[in-house]
Image: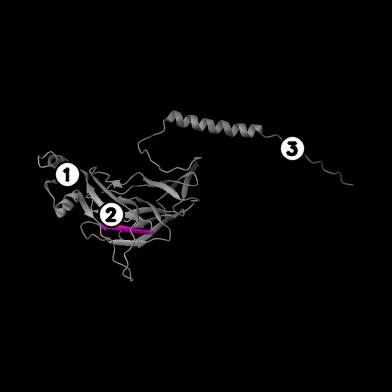
């Protein structure tokens, strides 16, 4: 389940054998109020006994309900198992999901109930999907330390990130893009089961790991504070400590006196 970044009353949910549904919490709240009014009726909650009307009332609050892809060549239903999802538009119409069956699917409520994009990536379950440097790109990870970027306009994998020795548990792009502008000089921050925090650059074609830190624990989430700035006094203190450590290391080394070789007298 995940909420929309700007419209807090909109959220989406999905899971094993449960296809994507987008809900409006404000409608659900009004529905609960109307239910309380019905219960307070002298005739009691059994006033409406129609199963069809009850089912219609239960469906209130659903903004979009996805439909599974078509059956396979044996006319068998395709399995549904959503592992993660992300809103990709400001008007909540586009949602991208990652499935346990190594699929990236894009749903567009304005086009159809079935996914408008269905791409298989590798052979391992997709664990995370995140917004990339803009809302046309999606970051994804799987259970086998693979991480990359897919362009949802074409369905092509446009980047891969290396250096992981364990499955990535969470990742985020900093600074975060907006719906109208892309993120400039974006960096990919991630944590994985190998206990490392890694920072990859996203501006070049090589996607190098520019920094990493060992965190001693298996982290499950990462959050970036884009407004925090390290005070100058703290920066100077860190630099001084590094210089002191370097000087102490050189002072601890044993000094070796240079021995000059004597020239042999020629006979």
Question: Along the horizontal axis of the image, is 141 left or right of 5?
Answer: right
Label 2 sits on residue:
20
- Residues marked 3 and 1 touching at CB (< 8 Å): no
Q: Residues within 10 Å of mark 3 (few under 14, many from 20)?
A: few
Label 3 sits on residue:
258
Q: CA distance from mark 3 to mark 1?
A: 90 Å
Question: Along the horizontal axis of the image, is 207 left or right of 183?
Answer: right
Q: Main secondary structure of the magenta part?
A: strand
- Nearest the viewer among 43 and 242 is 43
Element under disc 3: loop
Color theme of the render: one colour
Element under disc 2: strand
- Residues marked 2 and 1 touching at CB (< 8 Å): no
Residue 45 seen from this side: yes
Q: Earlier in the sequence, mark 2 or mark 3?
A: 2
Q: Residue furthest bottom?
A: 73
In this figure, what is the number of numbered marks? 3
Residue 134 seen from this side: no
Reply above or below: 237 against 101. above
Q: Position of residue 40 (x, y in %)?
A: 12, 38
Q: Position of residue 142 (x, y in %)?
A: 42, 54
Reply above or below: 164 against 156. above
Reply above or below: 261 against 49. above
Tag on residue 31? 1
- Nearest the viewer among 232 and 118 is 118
Q: Nearer the viewer, mark 2 or mark 1?
A: 1
Q: Residue at x 27, y 57 (%)?
A: 107
- Nearest the viewer among 89 and 258 is 89
Q: Position of residue 112 (x, y in %)?
A: 22, 60
Q: CA distance from mark 2 to mark 1?
A: 21 Å
Q: Which residues are magenta?
A: 102-107
Q: Residue at x 74, y 37 (%)?
A: 258
């Amino acid at each position: 389940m995940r909420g929309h970044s700007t419209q807090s009353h909109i959220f989406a949910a999905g899971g094993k054998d449960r296809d994507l549904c987008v809900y409006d919490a404000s409608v659900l709240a009004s529905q609960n109020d109307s239910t309380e009014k019905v219960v307070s009726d002298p005739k009691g909650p059994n006033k409406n006994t129609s199963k069809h009307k009850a089912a219609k009332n239960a469906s209130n609050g659903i903004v979009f309900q996805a439909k599974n892809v078509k059956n396979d060549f044996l006319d068998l239903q395709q399995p549904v198992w959503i592992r993660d999802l992300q809103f990709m538009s400001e008007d909540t119409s586009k949602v991208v999901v990652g499935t346990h069956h190594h699929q990236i699917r894009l749903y567009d409520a304005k086009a159809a109930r079935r996914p408008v994009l269905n791409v298989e990536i590798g052979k391992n379950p997709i664990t995370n999907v995140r917004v990339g440097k803009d809302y046309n790109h999606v970051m994804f990870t799987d259970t086998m330390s693979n991480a990359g970027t897919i362009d949802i306009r074409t369905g092509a994998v446009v980047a891969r990130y290396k250096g992981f020795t364990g499955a990535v548990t969470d990742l985020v792009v900093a600074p975060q893009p907006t719906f109208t502008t892309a993120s400039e000089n974006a960096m990919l921050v991630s944590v994985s089961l190998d206990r490392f925090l890694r920072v990859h650059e996203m501006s070049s074609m090589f996607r190098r790991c520019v920094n990493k830190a060992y965190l001693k624990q298996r982290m499950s989430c990462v959050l970036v504070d884009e407004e925090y700035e390290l005070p100058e006094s703290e920066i100077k203190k860190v630099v001084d400590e590094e210089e002191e450590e370097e000087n102490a290391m050189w002072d601890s080394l044993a000094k070796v006196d240079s021995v000059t070789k004597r020239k042999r007298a020629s006979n």
